Image (tube, rainbow, N blue to C red):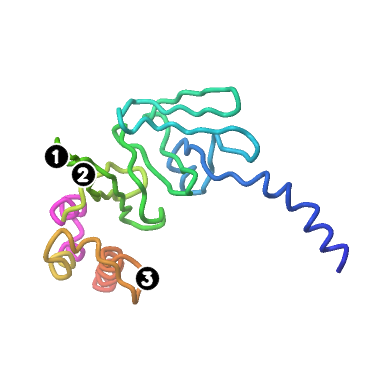
Amino acid sequence: MLYFLFLIVYNAPQVLAQERNEGVYINADDYAIGKLCYQSTQGKRYKLRIHTLINTATITIISSDTAITLLKNNVYGYRDKNKINYRFYNNIAYEIITTHQQHIVLYKTIVLTGNKGAQTMEKYFFSTTTNAPIHILTTQNLKNEFATNTWFIAGLDLYFKTDNELLNYDTFHQQYTLHYVYALTNQLSNQSLK
C-alpha cells in the first residue's frame, strides 16, 4: 500500500506536466477523437491568437520562442484554455455547444450590435454534421437541410412555434428538445417503414 502511494505522489508532477488544455484541431476527425495539435504544455509559454476582432484569415500560435501562423481555412478549429471547442467556418470562429455525436451540431457566436455603445448579442447556428456548412438556426433552414425527412419536418412544426424555441433544453431527457425531436421522429420514421 505504501509503495502504491509513493508511485502516485512520485508520478503526479509528470502527469500534471503532460496535461494539455488548448490547441488546434487540424480536421473534423481530429475534433471527433479529441486530438489536438500545436498544444500548450505546462511550464512553457503558450499563446493562441485567433484574431477575432479584426477577423483575419490566420491564427498565430506562440510556443516558447516560436511563432507559427496557420490559415483558418486549413484547420478545423481549436480548444481554448477554458476547454471550450470552436470551429472555423468562413474565417469565423463558432463555439461548438453540442457534442459531435449529435446529428445536428449547434454553435453560437457573439456579434456586436449597433454603432454607438455597441452591445454584444449571441447568435445561434447549426450544421448537419461536424464538417457540413453552417447555417443560421431557424426552423426554415432546418427544413431546407432536412427536406427529405418529412417526419422531422412535421416534428419541427409540432414542437416549435418560434425560432427561439429551437434552443429549449429538455431537462427530463437531458438534451436540447431539437435533438430529442430529431431522434424521436427518426425512430417513428423507421418504425413506419417496417
Disc 1 target residue: 114
| Residue behind mark 3 | 174
Is residue 87 placed above or below 185 in the rendered structure? above
Magenta highlight range: 139-153
Q: Position of residue 101 (x, y in %)?
A: 41, 57
Spatial separation of the CA atoms under disc 1 and disc 2: 7 Å
Magenta span: helix, strand or loop, mainly? helix
Q: Is residue 85 magenta?
A: no
For badge 3, the amino acid type reads Gln
Q: Position of residue 64 (x, y in %)?
A: 60, 27
Q: Tell us which disc is closer to us: 2 or 3.
A: 2
Q: State if disc 2 and disc 1 touch (CB < 8 Å).
A: yes
Residue situated in front as seen by the camera: 12 or 69: 12
Q: Secondary structure at mark 2?
A: strand
> Left or right: where does residue 30 sit relative to residue 162?
right
Q: Residues within 10 Å of mark 3 (few under 14, many from 20)?
A: few
Q: CA distance from mark 3 to mark 1?
A: 36 Å
Q: What residue is rendered at 30% in x and 71% in y?
A: 170
Q: Looking at numbered disc 1 in the image, what kind of residue is underneath it?
A: Gly
Left-right relation of 131 to 135: right
- Please tell me which of labels 3 and 1 falls first in the chain: 1
Residue at position x 46%, y 43% from top?
A: 80
At mark 3, the secondary structure is loop
- State the image quarter where residue 109 is shown: top left
Residue found 73% across the figure and 49% down from its top? 13
**Other residues around mark 2 within 10 Å, as few (<14) / some (14–19) / many (≥20):** few
Q: Nearer the viewer, mark 3 or mark 1?
A: 1
Check disc 2 and give the amino acid type. Gln
Residue denoted by label 2: 119
